[in-house]
Amino acid sequence: MSLETAKKVVLWLVENYEKEPKDTPPSINFFGGEPTLRFEELIKPLMVWARDKIKLSTKKEIRWGMTTNGVLLDETRLKFLSSFPTFSILLSIDGAEKSQNIQRKMANGADSFLLVAKNIPLILKYFPNTTFRSTITPKTAGLLSENYFFAKSQGFKTFFCTPNVREEWSEEATENLVKEVSYIIYNQYLDIIRKAPNILRFLLFERELKKILINDGTDIKKMNHLSCGFGVRSVGIGTQGEITACQEQNTHEKNIFYIGHIDTGIDPAKHEKLLNLLNQKDVIENSEKDLCINCPLRQSCSSYSCPSTSYDLFGEINIVNKMRCKWLLLNNQLAKTILEINSKSSKEDQNALINWMKGK
């Protein structure tokens, strides 16, 4: 993407924001590929230009963010980014040394762990709330707790992981994942009731806990576009200014996720057609429909679905991969188990969990 196109994207975003200003300011997230490859010629001059030229009627500032592998971040760049108070980083790293080197080779085939690891202290120095984000594969499922405790030892506060549903998962790999996640979550629970000072939050598990506490576990939701941005809350912008309903999708005009261009705006007909596809069913279905029968997440799994992945795998946007379902159910079941254990614990431990969930 050229700097000129990037500036047009910012102007387009601000123009649409000003049509109906909201409490939450507009946000821009740099996504790749690896965005830091264009740091000096695109990211830095764009942010400086926007700070100097863009003034929102609400007096708020644009929120900036980046998903990065961290290899090309140094103190100079991090210091610059931290001069924007709303900037945030999601570090895409697959774990400690063994997992990272299995899954993240450099272009020349070399290992990447040490290149990332040396930057972690600097990243957390300037952005202490950076999320540690990893993808789990069958090869690394048995290493998940090692990766979690590595992230904890480095000082991260939030840990997000998800299995690669595009791979085939053997029964052994799935069992390894169950054991590892169970171990992690029980250790987090112990940290909570012990009021440990450095709790590493396992984000999906927390979401399930809150669902159960707030809504008795049902979390009934009719499927809608707010499950993800989908051209309503967010869009993806291609290198030439193409607008897609998902940043992961390609920008070819024949792609169903292509909904317009910044020069002409979102095409209402294309966008409506896509939203209708999403909303044509009250609930989504598993790729093996029998698994949906009596599923405790039957009415709420749409809030976890990824239409983009579904479309790539099945040619439809209302189907969830079997491994995705297992992952969601695992976190839900573990949350229920922890709450059951907690209910039989001391009053002090029960209050510790409740207060922690309330953010006290």
Image: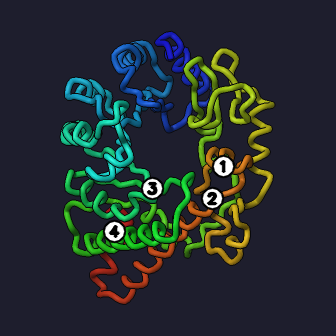
Disc 3 versus disc 1: distance between alpha carbons? 17 Å
Labels 3, 2: front one: 3
The relative height of residue 223 versus residue 264 in the rendered view (above or below) is below
- Using the image as rendered, state which of residue 284 and residue 64 is in the foreground: 284
- Up/down of 44 relative to 335, above or below: above
Q: Is residue 88 positioned above or below 227 on the image?
A: above
Q: What amino acid does circle 1 point to?
A: Leu
Q: Mark 1 points at which residue?
A: 313
Residue assigned mark 2: 321
Q: Which of marks 4 and 1 is in front?
A: 1
Nearer to us in this view, 59 or 273: 273
Which residue lies under the disc numbered 3?
137
Q: Residue at x 26, y 50 (%)?
A: 97
- Count neighbours of disc 3 (C-alpha within 10 A) and say few if under 14, some if 14 to 19, many if 20 or more: many
Q: Alpha-carbon distance for marks 4 and 2?
A: 24 Å
Compared with 49, 209 (above or below) is below
Q: Distance between the residues labelled 4 and 3?
A: 17 Å
Mark 3 or mark 1, earlier in chain: 3
> Residue at the spot x=46%, y=31% of the render?
33
In this picture, residue 313 sits left or right of residue 145:
right
Q: How is the image coloured?
A: rainbow
Q: Residue furthest front?
A: 109
